[in-house]
Image: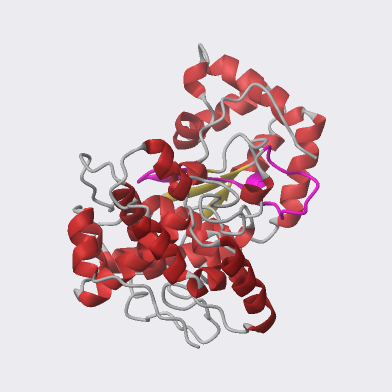
Amino acid sequence: MVLKLEGIKAENSMFCRIVLVSLTCQKNKFMYIRFFVVLLVTVLFSCQSSDTSTCALDEDRLEGRVELTIQRLEQSFFGAKTKEEMLALLEKYPEVTSRALGVDAYPNMDSLAGDLVRLHQDSSMQELNKAVAKEFADLSDVKVELEQAFAYLKSYYPDFKEPKVFTYVSGFGFDLIIDEEVIVIGLDYFLPSDHAFQPDIPRYLASRYERKYLVPMVVLAISSRYNKIDPKENTLLAEMVYYGKAYHFVKSILPCTSDQYLIGYTPEQIQACWDNEDIIWTHFIENELLFETNPFEIRKYIGEAPATDAISADAPGRIGRWLGWNIVEEFAVQQDLSLPEVMLESDAKKLFKDSGYRPRIPEN
């Protein structure tokens, strides 16, 4: 069931703004290795390792952990029966009113309040809210993950201030709204991918909107605050490095989270990419892609897509981002740099050179 509702100004998807990538391979070899790996692999790999079963968080980095309160606004907003009750909520939560509810699209608060009352009394919205309430009756796991992530952030960036965190059911109006002071989570976006209620987005994107992806998405969005760039650089390499630094940031803040929830590839896709890393890299070099500036060409390897057709229909989309992540990981290791030092490097060409990146040699 795809739910479409009018009256609330939808925000651009934070995830869609921040998370885009591409790939490259020779089709037949990619397909052969991919299916071979699906049958045999039992341990997952990523830029470091996706096996998090024995991972333990650094207690020193958790010292600054602060108790977090997640405010469940959907409960209050769906409980408002009159315009006066809704106005009281809008005034009580000005951070959400100004950021998430499209107040600028209305001539006054009374008009917004009236629309919200009608929206929240809509029968389809009521059913959606019930589904969210059942699926997310307990958010303790999300609370703990955010507390740990914020503690790690403060250990790297002492000036980081924990934002207020709210949840809401918008009728798929927005997924995440994030700035330095506030995080608003549209919980309806994170219902299971096989749920009857689904956002009106492609299935390959919808499969990444599940509970385990939520906190990595939040951290990925926060990474842009610290990811220094040179606005004059407009090459594919610059885009690859930007996203590579973003994923390096998320992995540093969430070291025990499997890479599939960071980059949005299945475990099989991650393993196939590693097994074909040399083919992917060869495609980039032989086609002189690193310093490509044509935005249409760049999008083939960076933009959201179900596959990177320029390499193979079996190659996952956004492979340029995955390759950029590998480059940044090599840079951090080779130069022995802290997370803030990596994020401050804005010269993509220098970062690439200093990384000494080369694809792994597959084992025979």
Q: Is residue 312 magenta?
A: no
Q: Is residue 192 magenta?
A: yes
Quarter that holds the N terminus: top right
Q: Nearer the viewer, residue 87 or 324?
A: 324
Q: How is the image coloured?
A: secondary structure
Q: Nearer the viewer, residue 185 or 86?
A: 185
Q: Residue at x 24, y 69 (%)?
A: 355
Q: Where is residue 35? Give x, y as percent.
A: 67, 73
Q: Where is residue 69? Give x, y as percent.
A: 50, 56
Tally the numbered discs: 0
Task: Look at the image and tell me whether residue 148 can be seen.
Answer: no
**Relative horizontal placement of residue 203, taking residue 160 as reference (left or right):** right
Q: Nearer the viewer, residue 349 or 212?
A: 349
Q: Nearer the viewer, residue 39 or 186?
A: 39
Q: Residue at x 68, y 37 (%)?
A: 200
The vertical placement of 301 against 124, above or below, is below
**Relative horizontal placement of residue 230, taking residue 144 as reference (left or right):** left
The vertical placement of 58 against 233, above or below, is below
Range shown magenta? 177-200
Task: Look at the image and tell me whether residue 297 can be seen.
Answer: yes
Q: Where is residue 223? Give x, y as percent.
A: 35, 54
Q: Residue at x 45, y 50 (%)?
A: 301
Q: Where is residue 110? Give x, y as percent.
A: 57, 16
The vertical placement of 149 against 309, above or below, is below
